Image: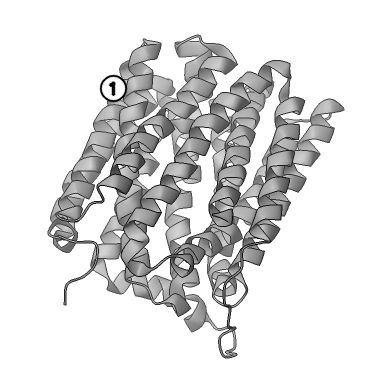
Amino acid sequence: MRFWCTRLAATTGNQMLMVAVGWQMYDLTGSAWDLGLVGLYQFLPALLLSLVAGHVADRVHRARIVAACVLAQAVVALTLVVTTHGGWVSREWLLGLSIVLGAARAFQMPAQQALTPILVPAVMLPRAMAFSSGGMQAAIIGGPALGGLIFVAGATAVYATCTLLFAIGMALILRVHYDHEPPPHEPVSLSSLMAGVRFIWQRKVVLGAVSLDLFAVLLGGAVALLPIYAKDVLHVGPWGLGLLRGAPAAGALLMSVLLTRWPLERQVGPKLLVAVGVFGVATLVFGVSRSLSVSLLALAVSGAADMISVVVRQTLVQLETPDAMRGRVSAVNSVFIGASNQLGEFESGATAALLGPVGSVVFGGVGTVLVAALWWRWFPQLARRDRMQRQA
């Protein structure tokens, strides 16, 4: 429960931080390109450090890794309190601190993902994944909405609240205990670092699931453009931005409750592919909408569909991976997640600079539907997958 509460506090703080940084960056520069750079600058450290982070997660106490990463995010939030209050914040400051956030997330995500299966029995893992994801989605709902409301008092107030939440999360994770036996010493080698890559490549069901999420969210993610939609398309301001950021999480939270009560047991592969197609259609609807209510509904549907993808992907990865390799496999999975989120933000910003925000989102929605159709053909093992657990 402490681990769940840690993730709740840290995710809420991170979501509030991203709302404030995105709005502040767009307010400073008015540039969709710069909004995309915030995502790119978070993704690059995660890409460069992922293999090392996975190796560390398989050797060091995972709860302590998470604690150190949450501490780093608290330092970033506190730095933004000081620079914003002093009037020193700039485009360069925001991009530089985005690099620090990306480096912290590079180590946090594999350790965090690999920690969950240690704390729950394997038979309960699908429900635990849905419950954990539900808590995170609650944070993703509350974080942006709360951040948008607090932003009325200024960015400094948002960053101060984030600092407090990260401090609470760090205190909680330090009280999470499990039996950690350091693995036998082995020299760090390219072969050891690449073990997670080889593992995923050899298991086509897992490869299909994680790559599907990568390309679907890479193309279909519109999160980076929400400040533009809030300010220039829907004209709803910071409060409306908080609602838009929270809408996908609202749909995801509802779906997580349903999946916790009625977990996916049969036809998990086809359901995953259909869910990604629905995600693309919902993104397309959001892109062309000029109504706040229609936009919120479309984003909620996209979040519900994405939750199915998250639960299926994470459960498949954890059930098929031995604990001694979970850190390295989770690190590779984290790169896919980071690429789909942070790199997706850069892709959205770049295409918005060329096609405009509406053109960028419509292009991404159509692309996501095509990806789902192609993966159905290219990964027949995934399309035919019946249960989460492989049958003997």
Colour mode?
Answer: one colour
**Residue at 48% from the left image edge and 50% from the top image edge:** 338
Between 187 and 35, the one lying in front of the other is: 187
Residue 142, quarter of the rendered image? top right
Identify the amino acid type marked 1.
Val
Between 230 and 6, the one lying in front of the other is: 6
**Which quadrant does the N terminus fall into?**
bottom right
* Circle 1: element type: helix
**Residue at 53% from the left image edge and 57% from the top image edge:** 109
Viewed as shown, does residue 217 lie left or right of 42? left
Q: Is residue 119 above or below residue 11?
A: below
Viewed as shown, does residue 8 lie left or right of 320? right
Residue 355, quarter of the rendered image? top left
**Residue at 46% from the left image edge and 32% from the top image edge:** 223
Image coordinates for residue 84, horizontal then vertical, percent: 80, 28
Between 98 and 69, the one lying in front of the other is: 69
Image coordinates for residue 104, horizontal then vertical, percent: 64, 55
Image coordinates for residue 32, horizontal then vertical, percent: 54, 26
Residue 103, quarter of the rendered image? bottom right
Mark 1 = which residue? 285
Q: Is residue 59 above or below residue 37?
A: below
